[in-house]
Amino acid sequence: MLRIAVPNKGMLSEPAWTMLSEAGYRLRSNPRQLVVEDPDNDVELFYLRPLDIAVYVGRGTIDVGITGHDLLLNSGTDAEEVMDLGFGASTFRFAAPQDSDIRELADIQGKRVATSFDKLVHDYLVEQGIEAETIHLDGAVESSVQLGVADLIADVVSTGTTLRNAGLRIFADPIVHSEAVLIRSPRLDAQDERLIRLSRRLQGVLTAKRYVLMDFDIPVEKVSAAVSVTPGFESPTISPLHDKQWSAVRVMVPKAQVNQVMDQLYEVGARGIIVTAIQASRM
């Protein structure tokens, strides 16, 4: 069976569970379950702490896992990214007190930086040629400055509200942009059929979330003009109709552009436009 690590809590957990469910995998029936066997899909799901997933996958104990790009970088393991999963977007930023004279990256020189991601921060500062003390804390790093443990912090930022409420000000460029990713063990072949099947299913879920199917009829001589205004996920399917002067076209269109594309299609002569949702593939 393919062993899959899933976040057991945190901001990545519920979106990860939803994605796997939509891809056709069995989830746990109660929060006490740590392992779920899904023989129909030849997989086992292991519910683990998000911070530990990259370690298990990197060491080959687990075949694949869902975790954050930032958590993978901080783990220092040999786990490899397979694909982005389209949720859990965040940035990793430096923040200092509002009245602090620390306002740009160079000002961190010689200072104390509190963070839960000490390897990620240390490696970034070394890369930037800055010497600073990195202080590891497991949580609530925004309190470290007020308590005198650090001069500034480095932490995950989604909206910045928590930092502002703690009297901290974000500065400098993001250390890293992050989102949820599927990772694999270096011991698992990238061409393993089980991994390919999982990747295809997850990609099917992403496609279903981002695109819709659009069907319409168009005069043959205007097919090229119609295709040019449909920014599809892949090449459109064009079929002849009983009336030889018309063609039927099917294309996937980004949900955010549906109204705009419909208006443009009507302008070039399309008729009978139908928009339908895409079902995630479970092949």
Image (tube, grey):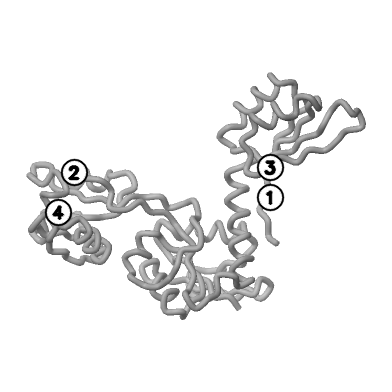
Q: Earlier in the sequence, mark 4 or mark 3?
A: 4
Disc 4 marks a residue whose amino acid type is: Leu
**Relative horizontal placement of residue 120, taking residue 185 as reference (left or right):** left
Q: Earlier in the sequence, mark 3 or mark 1?
A: 3
Residue 244: where, in percent of width, then height? 90, 29
Gap in angstroms between the C-alphas marked 4 and 3: 50 Å
Front label number (4 vs 3): 3
Gap in angstroms between the C-alphas marked 3 and 1: 18 Å
Q: Secondary structure at mark 4?
A: strand
Looking at the image, which residue is at 12% across and 53% down?
108
Q: Which residue is mark 4?
A: 152
The disc at residue 169 is: 2
Q: Name the image quarter holding residue 216.
A: top right
Gap in angstroms between the C-alphas marked 4 and 1: 47 Å
Residue 264: where, in percent of width, then height? 65, 23
Residue 253: where, in percent of width, then height? 63, 37
Q: Secondary structure at mark 1?
A: loop
Relative depth, front residue between 131 and 273: 131
Q: Name the image quarter holding residue 45.
A: bottom right
Gap in angstroms between the C-alphas marked 1 and 2: 44 Å
Q: Earlier in the sequence, mark 3 or mark 2?
A: 2
Gap in angstroms between the C-alphas marked 2 and 4: 10 Å
Q: Earlier in the sequence, mark 4 or mark 1?
A: 4
Q: Which residue is mark 1?
A: 279
Disc 2 marks a residue whose amino acid type is: Arg
Q: Are marks 1 and 2 in contact (CB under 8 Å)?
A: no
Could you classify mark 1 by the number of other residues whose Cα lies within 10 Å: few (under 14), some (14-19), or many (20 or more)?
some
Front label number (3 vs 2): 3
Looking at the image, which residue is at 80% across and 34% down?
248
Q: Secondary structure at mark 3?
A: loop
Q: Earlier in the sequence, mark 2 or mark 4?
A: 4
Q: Are marks 3 and 2 in contact (CB under 8 Å)?
A: no
